[in-house]
Amino acid sequence: MKKDLFSQSRILARASEHIRDVFDLWGYEEIFLPAVEEYSEQLRDGLKITYNNAFYLVKPDITSQIVVNLKNEEPRRLCYISEVLKDGINGRWQAGAEFIGGSDMQMVLEILSLIITLLERLGIENFYIDVGSIMVWENALKDVSEYREEVFLALKRRNFGVIEELDIPDQKKEELWYLFNFRGRKSPCNRLNEIVENLNDERVFIDFGTIRFYPYYEDIVFEVYSSNVGHPLGGGGSYRVGSMKACGFAMNLEVIAGLARLTDEDGRIILKGKSWSAYEQARKLVMEKKKVRVI
């Protein structure tokens, strides 16, 4: 059944208003990116098309699009609300932010804090964040590097049976089993411990099984879940833009808008438009940054 676009737009717009306000309060600048980019191996997702014998991508992954377009290496805090095309013509509305050019720990702590305040602002309290590390797995696989692809496939499928079938020592399988199943608030990874301790939020966990499979992620990755939804609300991680380090996230806007608990009252002033004076009054109120509706 086709969606009711008008009702859906109303839901997304209300959530977006609160999301943009949270981004602004944290000091993030909204970026508007072109819908079509010339094809690049750095870009992810999007719909591939040809035009005048050249290849292009329509609405690609936003993080990779920012990386491709960022020419001046200077610290930035960017945010966006945009549709991304995945698996052909299937679109997904996303709300996300990117902190570029800060220190490693500062960026991770700020981005995770931003996610927490954003969800709380939307009235979503039943959520948790799992934080993992790609480097933990890279280090664990150094002596069996020929099986790296198979191990990461097992992580993607959440199926340890793939690893069980590999021709590697039992001791190594036990080590990988421990990592595969570890979830807690204190781990053998000091960097992840530091993140959890500094955030001091009981909804944040260390989960070595959490891996995101975009190739630009370098180490820290995280995913956001809710027991009310059977798939992640969103996620992100640390990556690099030129010589600068960065950290960002993207949330599924349609999902979090559907979970949001927002009151119907928005403090809007209702004016009766039986005369043109109502619009004169409305203009003055709008200039004072007050919400109005003429009926």
Image: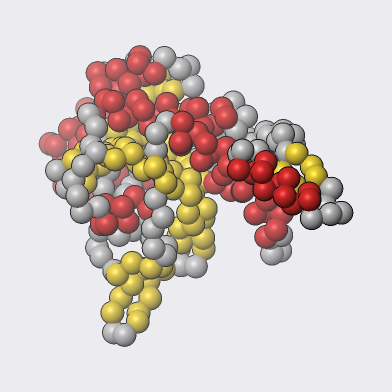
Q: Residue sitting at 46 percent across and 36 percent down?
A: 23
Q: Residue furthest bottom?
A: 52
Locate residue 233, reporting x and y percent: 51, 40
Q: Compared with residue 62, is residue 188 higher up or lower down, i.e. above or below? A: above
Q: Residue sitting at 29 percent across and 70 percent down?
A: 38
As rendered, which of 252 and 73 lies closer to the eye? 73
As rendered, which of 36 and 266 lies closer to the eye? 266
Quarter where residue 34 is shown: bottom left
Horizontal relation, residue 118 to residue 8: left or right:
left
Q: Residue furthest right?
A: 274
Q: Residue sitting at 39 percent across and 34 percent down?
A: 27
Quarter where residue 100 is shown: top left
Locate residue 146, reporting x and y percent: 16, 47
Q: Compared with residue 202, is residue 78 higher up or lower down, i.e. above or below? A: below
Quarter where residue 43 is shown: bottom left
Q: Compared with residue 125, is residue 229 higher up or lower down, i.e. above or below? A: below
Q: Is residue 209 visible?
A: no
Horizontal relation, residue 246 to residue 292: left or right:
left
As rendered, which of 172 and 290 lies closer to the eye? 290
As rendered, which of 212 and 235 lies closer to the eye? 235
Locate residue 168, reporting x and y percent: 20, 38
Horizontal relation, residue 205 to residue 74: left or right:
right
Locate residue 175, reporting x and y percent: 26, 27
Number of dots carrying numbers: 0
> Dividing the image into 4 quarters, which one contains the N terminus?
bottom right
Q: Is residue 286 visible?
A: yes
Q: Residue sitting at 73 percent across and 38 percent down?
A: 268
